[in-house]
């Protein structure tokens, strides 16, 4: 049975924290594939600063040497606000026999009940929650209303072929955020070892992250 990880987000820009977490999720869940899914826009965040096509290309450059990693641009092609329930429903129809794992940070998980069609999310995938520096650990958060079980800590507790499980997965803590990268670029700081080398020079050209990026939230 195919196991697919789905890592959504703005990726504005992609950084090494994203990639290291994705590698550890891939290993812990013994995935066959991990897809990065850049969002077009979110109801809960300001619009991304870099265009969708550029963010997609940065992800493709950043992951080209990582076997099993792909970039899925369906939310960019769909346009408008990106709704995880729609994305998961599409992938579920395309991959009816696969086990789907949606990967998100503990900050996003805390607001899961506010997501579009939140009541459907537990029927569509398992949920893998990663701790983020500066935010409560996943174990300290209340599960969403649709959850019928405890938050798990062992990947083996998420049944292959099932949905609705919640896993708090410990990954190497890396204190990098997209907003911090944007701020460093805006102030003329160096971003060596914060972002993939394959995209570092393009990020520094200043076209997308100008001086006003200092105040942009993540």
Image: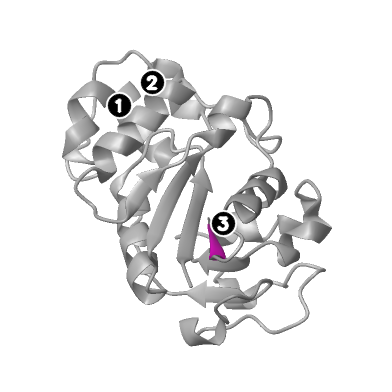
In this picture, is 7 found above or below 141?
Answer: above
Q: How crowded is mark 1: few (under 14 residues within 10 Å), some or many (20 or more)?
A: many
Residue at (22, 41) in percent of width and height: 196
Residue at (60, 67) in percent of width and height: 127
Instruction: Locate residue 131, reporting x and y percent.
Output: 49, 66
User: Which comes before the other along the chain, label 3 or label 1?
Assistant: 3
For marks 3 and 2, give the one nearer the viewer: 3
Question: Is residue 113 rendered to the left or right of residue 32?
Answer: right
Q: Name the residue under label 3.
A: 95
For mark 3, give the secondary structure: loop
Question: Is residue 19 rendered to the left or right of residue 119?
Answer: left
Q: Which is more toward the observer, 155 or 71?
A: 71
36 inside magenta stretch: no
Snapshot quadrant of residue 173: bottom left
Contact, mark 1 vs mark 2 (Cβ under 8 Å): yes
Measured Cα–Cα span from mark 3 to mark 1 = 40 Å
Q: Which residue lies furthest to the top in this view?
A: 207
Q: Which is more toward the observer, 118 or 212?
A: 118
Residue range (magenta): 99-103
For marks 3 and 1, give the one nearer the viewer: 3
User: Which comes before the other along the chain, label 3 or label 2?
Assistant: 3
């Amino acid at each position: 049975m195919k196991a697919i990880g789905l890592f959504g987000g703005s990726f504005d820009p992609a950084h090494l924290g994203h990639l290291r977490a994705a590698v550890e999720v891939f290993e812990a869940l013994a995935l066959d594939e991990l897809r990065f899914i850049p969002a077009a826009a979110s109801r809960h965040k300001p619009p991304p600063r870099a265009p969708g096509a550029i963010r997609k290309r940065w992800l493709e450059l950043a992951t080209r040497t990582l076997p099993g990693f792909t970039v899925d641009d369906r939310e960019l092609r769909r346009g408008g606000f990106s709704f995880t329930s729609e994305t998961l429903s599409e992938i579920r129809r395309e991959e009816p026999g696969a086990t789907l794992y949606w990967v998100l940070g503990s900050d996003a998980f805390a607001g899961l009940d506010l997501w579009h069609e939140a009541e459907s999310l537990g029927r569509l995938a398992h949920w893998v929650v990663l701790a983020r520096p500066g935010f409560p650990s996943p174990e300290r958060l209340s599960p969403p209303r649709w959850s019928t079980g405890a938050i798990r800590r062992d990947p083996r507790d998420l049944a292959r072929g099932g949905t609705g499980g919640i896993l708090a997965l410990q990954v190497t803590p890396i204190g990098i955020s997209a907003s911090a990268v944007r701020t460093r670029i805006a102030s003329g700081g160096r971003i060596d070892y914060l972002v993939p080398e394959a995209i570092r020079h393009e990020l520094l050209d200043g076209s997308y992250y100008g001086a006003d990026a200092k105040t942009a939230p993540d």
